[in-house]
Image (cartoon, rainbow, N blue to C red):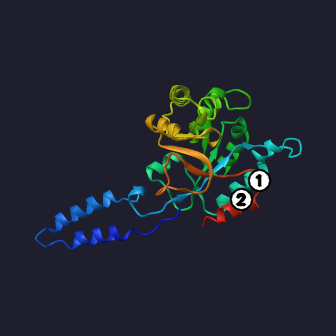
Amino acid sequence: MRKKHLSFGVIISLLFVFLLPFSLSFKNRTALLSALTNVISYDNFADLNVTTKVPILMYHYIRDVDKNFDPMGWRLSTSPYFFEEQMKYLKENGYTTINLKDLEDGKVPEKAIVLTFDDGLEDFYTTAFPILQKYGFTASNTVITNMVGRNGHMTIEQLRACARAGIELISHSKSHFSMSSLGKEKLESEVYDAADFLRNNLRIEPFGFVYPSGKYNKLVIKTLRESGYKIALTTNEGEADLSDDDWLILPRIRVDNRNGILGFKKKLEELL
């Protein structure tokens, strides 16, 4: 996370408060200053010329895959060895993992980073989760609600165990359809039914959303906004700028076997 100084306009406003005519008591000037500083709090990223950038990493499978036998699967995966080396690097270099909800709450320390894992896959629970716990890290896992307990996806019991341990669970839609190709009725079903599943089965109030395959359009964004989602993640490559970016189309940084550890370090070092 990197911050700029207060904008020129804000500085002038602060000086104006202290240079008010002395007919206004110091108590009243102080009260006015307090009100002004509350309005321009650093928590209100969009209201200040303060740039708060946070890398949001995007993982899929954490598993070993034969590159020659399954090249697509290999590109969607990160080997457990590389993953642990990456977590070790983050720990040794002072990164703090946070959840998406922390962004809205303003809990964004220096060198904050968000780890996201798409699809609610079972190898998150069996492989990534123990490594995250080893290093004291949290993460955000995206759940395809129709796939819970099916075809290599986490069961409801595994999801609940993750939630109890502080892993953030967010929606990845009901069926993982390309949402930009859906009509209004089907789109609303994908959004609202997934939200209902999280509420009814995991007691989670939906907050974050990840677009299946990164596909979205104006109707998708409008539907998410109307349904109460605060943050939505894309597959667009880049570091999230919380002061400039639309929070419903935040970019992420893809991580997979093609990065290894050296490529992983390079991606993060370029952001510093």
Q: In which quarter of the image is residue 20?
A: bottom left
Q: How crowded is mark 1: few (under 14 residues within 10 Å), some or many (20 or more)?
A: many
Residue 213: image tag: none
Residue 22 to residue 101: above or below: below
Q: Position of residue 122 (x, y in %)?
A: 71, 35
- Residue type, numbered disc 1: Phe
Residue at left 53%, top 59%? 53
Determine whether, in the image, residue 82 is placed left or right of residue 217. right
Real-space CA distance between mark 2 and mark 1, rounded to the nearest whole angstrom: 9 Å
Residue 264: image tag: 2
Q: In which quarter of the image is residue 150?
A: top right
Residue 172 visible somewhere in the drawing: no
Q: Quadrant of residue 17?
A: bottom left
Marks 2 and 1: which is nearer the front? 2
Residue 27 to residue 165: above or below: below
- Residue type, numbered disc 2: Phe
Q: Residues within 10 Å of mark 2 (few under 14, many from 20)?
A: many
Check whether the beta carbons of the residues at disc 2 and disc 1 lie within 8 A of each other. yes
Q: Position of residue 151 (x, y in %)?
A: 74, 28
For label 1, the SS is: helix
For label 2, the SS is: helix
Residue at left 69%, top 54%? 87
Label whose residue precedes the other's in the sequence (2 or 1): 1
Residue underneath mark 1: 82
Q: Position of residue 37 (x, y in %)?
A: 31, 61
Residue at left 65%, top 66%? 270
